[in-house]
Image (cartoon, rainbow, N blue to C red):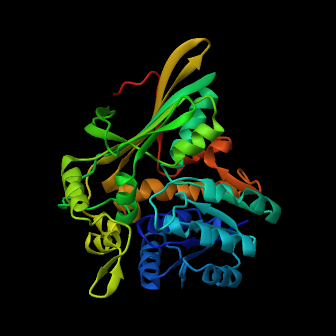
């Protein structure tokens, strides 16, 4: 039986989620796309109608305001909310889902506006509330977090007696031709990159200076060789919590020297600050102003060429022998744009959001409470990745590095 879904957020990822849900109309029979700016929703709905031959409806909602989200959910009565809004809107939307007993899914963990702090404590605190309400919240169903969590669970299930180390490597081999732009929300991107780095080592997180550790990484299938930098990402926290055999966990992301040069200048002149400053009698947040003048990530779709390569290298024990395995996906920016009108960064986040929602709506993954993806059987999700646009490859042993 087809279900009804409300998607909150009309950026690049929201666009992909709308298209991918429309492609699976036997599951998502009624789709409502809502955001603060309904004109963006209408533009996406027009694209979905043109490409997928499916009508979706639109609505306006300020996701900062729980009351507005409650009003929308009471009016629409969806089976599920897919939250692809901003990370600091997670809790207001979760509160609305609790009030209306609606299932919930997001792609990134909550963070407060005033602090670049990435942790699951705020959302994990909702476990008992969601369990008592008889509804489910699935956290981080994007690519990283999301697919990387599923990859790790898949490696632990099928390739290791004991998974001991993971390196998550996120390489964007694309080029958009702009002097400086971010591939997803500039505010969130820059907050992530400039935050102190943390990695898991022998039972605790070790903090180091942002971007202080880097190395070269050669991707498979001629994607190329890139400089990757160690940084903190929220899936490390959930993975070492739910797979306690992991004694070392690191996250790496590629950055060009051009990106880093621009970022350093912006930091030096105070444009990455997230605290308000007074300008002409008005308080503004420099990073939010910077976001307003940078290219909109959803506008980069027709400009971006090349491929992404995101995966997990796992090491551990199998039958008393040390081994290493690499599981990864390669995604073409051009192919993503041809299918849904977005570049691959949005595509690789939006497809897993749809798949996680599908797992929930079909009952494959359905359990009251608050959950991360690695807490469920990875096999059906892995099969769906192959079916819906993000095919994966396993190298045993890895041929990269």
5 versus 345 height, above or below: below
**Residue located farthest toward the bottom when viewing the structure as drawn:** 281
Left or right? Give the position of 12 relative to 201: left
| Residue 13 placement (x, y as % from top left) | 45, 64
Depth check: 33 or 227 in front? 227
Left or right? Give the position of 187 relative to 63: left
| Residue 53 placement (x, y as % from top left) | 49, 73
Depth check: 198 or 275 in front? 275
Left or right? Give the position of 115 relative to 245: left
| Residue 344 placement (x, y as % from top left) | 37, 55
**Residue located farthest toward the top when viewing the structure as drawn:** 320
The total number of labels drawn is: 0
Q: Which residue is drawn at 34% across and 28% down?
A: 401
Depth check: 241 or 357 in front? 241
Would you say residue 93 is visible in this rendering? yes
Q: Residue at x 27, y 35 (%)?
A: 222
Depth check: 383 or 252 in front? 252
Quadrant assignment, res 73: bottom right
273 versus 349 height, above or below: below
Q: Residue at x 69, y 68 (%)?
A: 3
| Residue 90 placement (x, y as % from top left) | 57, 66
Quadrant assignment, res 218: top left
Q: Is the N terminus in the top left, top right, bottom left or bottom right quadrant?
A: bottom right
Would you say residue 386 is visible in this rendering? no
Quadrant assignment, res 190: bottom left
């Amino acid at each position: 039986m087809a279900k009804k879904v409300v998607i909150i957020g009309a950026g690049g990822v929201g666009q992909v989620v709308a298209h991918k849900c429309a492609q699976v109309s036997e599951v998502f029979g009624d789709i409502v796309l809502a955001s603060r700016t309904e004109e963006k929703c209408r533009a996406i709905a027009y694209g979905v109608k043109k490409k997928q031959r499916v009508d979706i409806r639109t609505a306006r909602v300020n996701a900062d305001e729980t009351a507005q989200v409650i009003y929308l959910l009471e009016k629409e009565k969806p089976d599920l909310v897919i939250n692809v809004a901003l990370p600091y809107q997670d809790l207001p939307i979760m509160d609305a889902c609790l009030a209306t007993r609606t299932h919930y899914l997001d792609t990134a963990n909550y963070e407060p506006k005033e602090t670049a702090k990435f942790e699951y404590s705020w959302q994990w605190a909702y476990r008992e509330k969601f369990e008592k309400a008889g509804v489910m919240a699935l956290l981080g169903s994007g690519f990283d977090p999301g697919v990387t969590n599923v990859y790790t669970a898949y490696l632990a299930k099928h390739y290791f007696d004991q998974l001991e180390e993971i390196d998550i490597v996120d390489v964007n081999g694309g080029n958009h031709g702009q002097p400086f732009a971010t591939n997803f929300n500039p505010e969130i991107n820059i907050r992530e990159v400039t935050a102190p780095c943390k990695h898991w080592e022998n039972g605790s997180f070790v903090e180091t200076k942002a971007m202080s550790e880097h190395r070269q990484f050669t991707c498979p299938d001629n994607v190329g060789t890139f400089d990757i930098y160690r940084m903190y990402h929220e899936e490390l926290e959930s993975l070492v919590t739910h797979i306690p055999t992991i004694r070392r966990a690191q996250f790496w992301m590629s950055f060009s020297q051009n990106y880093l040069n621009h970022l350093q200048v912006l930091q030096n002149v105070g444009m990455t600050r997230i605290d308000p400053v007074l300008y002409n009698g008005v308080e503004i947040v420099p990073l939010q102003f910077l976001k307003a003048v940078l290219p909109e990530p959803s506008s980069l779709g027709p400009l971006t060429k090349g491929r992404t390569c995101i995966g997990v290298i796992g090491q551990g024990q199998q039958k008393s022998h040390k081994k290493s395995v690499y599981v990864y996906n390669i995604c073409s920016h051009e192919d993503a744009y041809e299918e849904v009108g977005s570049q691959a960064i949005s595509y690789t986040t939006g497809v897993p959001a749809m798949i996680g929602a599908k797992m929930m709506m079909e009952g494959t993954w359905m359990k009251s409470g608050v959950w991360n993806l690695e807490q469920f059987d990875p096999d059906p999700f892995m099969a769906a990745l192959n079916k819906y646009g993000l095919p994966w490859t396993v190298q045993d042993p890895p041929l990269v590095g």
